[in-house]
Amino acid sequence: MERSPILRIFTLQPSSGVPIYRQLIEQVRRLVASGQLTPGTELPSVREVAAEYTVNPTTISKAYSLLEGEGLLQRNRGKPMTIAGGRQKAGALPQRLRQIEPQVAALVLAARQLDLSSIELCQFISKKMGEES
Amino acid sequence: MTVPVVTARNLGKTIGRKSILHDISVDVEPGSVVGIIGKNGAGKTTLMDVLLGFSPATSGSSGLFGHDSFTLPGDIRGRIGFVPQQDELVTMLDGQQHLEMAAALQGRWNRELTNRLQRAWELPMDRAVRQLSGGERQKLSILLALGHEPELLVLDEPVAALDPISRRQFLQELLAIAGSPGRTVLFSTHIVSDLERVADRIWIVRGGTIAWAGLLDELKESVVRLNVTARRALPQRLPLEGVISLRLAGHRANAVVSRWDESTLPALRKVLDADIDVEPLSLEDLFVEFHS
C-alpha cells in the first residue's frame, strides 16, 4: 500500500509527558501556520497514523476532532480530512511566535540556570537552525 | 445505555488473614483499552483473576457483560480471551494440536488471523511445547486467546518474554483489535512505553487497590512538575494544590502536583515572584512519583 508522505511529517513520542493528541495538534498548528501544510492538503486517516506510529487510534481521532473544532481541519464525507481553506494562510509572525512561546519560556529558564547570555543562546539557536535546514 | 464489560463494586480478596485486594470499584466501558501498572506484588494478577471469576472475591462483587464473574454462563465465557502470566500449555502437545483444541472448544475460529500471526511470528506449530522457547510459548498463548475474536481480551504481562520486534508486531495486533468497535482490552505490563502507545485508560494498582483510574491523557495533563526559580527566598508553604512531592531550598523549588490547572500559572508566577517552568511527566516518572 502506498503511504502518504505526510505520514512521516509528524514526530509523535508516546513516552513524552505531553499526551499524544496534544503533540499532534501542536504539530498540525505549526505546520499550517508556517505554510508547510496548505489548504486542501489531505491528511492520512486516523487508522494510518495510528498504525504508522503504533499508537491508539482514539488519541489520533481526538486530535483530528479538536482541530476540526478549531476550524483548522475539514471533515469530508467518505474522503480524507483536509486542511481547511480560508483564514489560515501562513500566519502572521506574532501569531507564529505566540505558538512557540511555551517552549521559549522553558528554554529561557534553562538558559538562566546555566548562566547563558541571550547573545550566546541566540548564536547557538542560529547554528542549530542552520544545521537542520 | 451500554452495559459495562467489566464491573467491580467494593471488591476485596483475603487469603488466610492477608488482605490481597480491597475497596476496588471500577467500570470498564466497551471499546476501551485499559493498561494496568503496579509494582510487583501490588495485586495486579489477583485482580485480573477475581475480575474474570477464576478466583472468588471475599467481599463485594465483580461482573462481566452484566453477569456475576464467578458464576459465569458458558456462552459469556466464550466472549472472553485470556493470556495468563504463566502459560497453561500442555508440554507434550504441539502448537497445531493446541490450536485445534482451542478452535473445537470455542466453536468459532478465525483461521486467517491465526495463520497470519503464526507466519509473522515464525511460530513452529509442529513442535512440542516443551521444545519451544519462553517467547514462543508466549506467542502461542496469545494466538490461542485471539483466535475466537473475543470481545474482551485480558492479558497479564503478555510481552515480558517477547523480543522488541515481536513486541511491536503484537502491539500492532492489539491496536487492530482496539480499533474494532465494541472490543475491549485489559492488560498489565511493566513496559510503560508499550502502555503509553496502546492504552487509553490507566489503572495504577498500589497496595491491593486501584490508587488511580482514568484517562491516560488526563493523567498526563493533571500531574506536572513545577520548577520554580524565585527572585527572593520562597515561603515554607507554597500555594499549591495536590502536592505529591516537594523539594524546597532557598530560591528554588521543585514540586510535583496533581490537579494542575494551567490557568493559575500567571497568578502563581506573580505571587512567588518567580520563573516557573511547567514540565510534563512521562508515565514512568509519574508512576515513580506515585510511589514516593
Image (cartoon, helix red, strand yellow):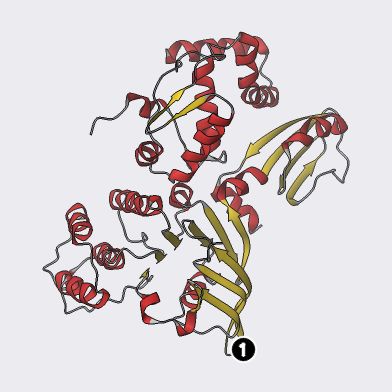
Task: Please provide percent x and percent y for residue A94.
Answer: 65, 11
In the figure, B231 relative to B44: above or below?
above
Q: Nearer the viewer, residue B73 or B129?
A: B73
Q: Is residue B106 left or right of residue B200?
A: left
Quadrant for the C terminus of chain B in the image = bottom right
Q: In this view, does B171 lie to the left or right of B36?
A: left
Quarter-wise, where is residue B60 in the image?
A: bottom right
Q: Mark 1 points at which residue?
A: B17
Q: Residue at x 44, y 81 (%)?
A: B72
Q: Can residue B223 be seen in this view?
A: no
Count of numbered circles in the view:
1
> Residue lying furthest bottom in this view?
B16
In the figure, B129 relative to A84: above or below?
below
Q: In this view, does B199 lie to the left or right of B217?
A: left
Quadrant for the N terminus of chain B in the image = bottom right
Chain letter of the residue carrying label 1: B
> Residue lying furthest left in this view?
B126
Judged from the image, the secondary structure of the residue bearing numbered disc 1 is loop
Task: Decide: few, some or many residues near mark 1? Use Cα within 10 Å; few <14, some 14-19, many ≥20.
Answer: few
Amino acid marked by disc 1? Arg
Q: Which residue is drawn at 24% across and 69% down?
A: B108
Q: Can residue B143 be seen in this view?
A: yes
Quarter-wise, where is residue B281 in the image?
A: top right
Q: Residue at x 43, y 58 (%)?
A: B182
Q: Is residue B53 left or right of residue A80?
A: right
Q: Residue at x 23, y 62 (%)?
A: B110
Task: Please provide percent x and percent y for residue B291.
Answer: 63, 59
Quarter-wise, where is residue A91 in the image?
A: top right
Task: Please provide percent x and percent y for residue B181.
Answer: 41, 54
Task: Please provide percent x and percent y for residue A35.
Answer: 48, 13
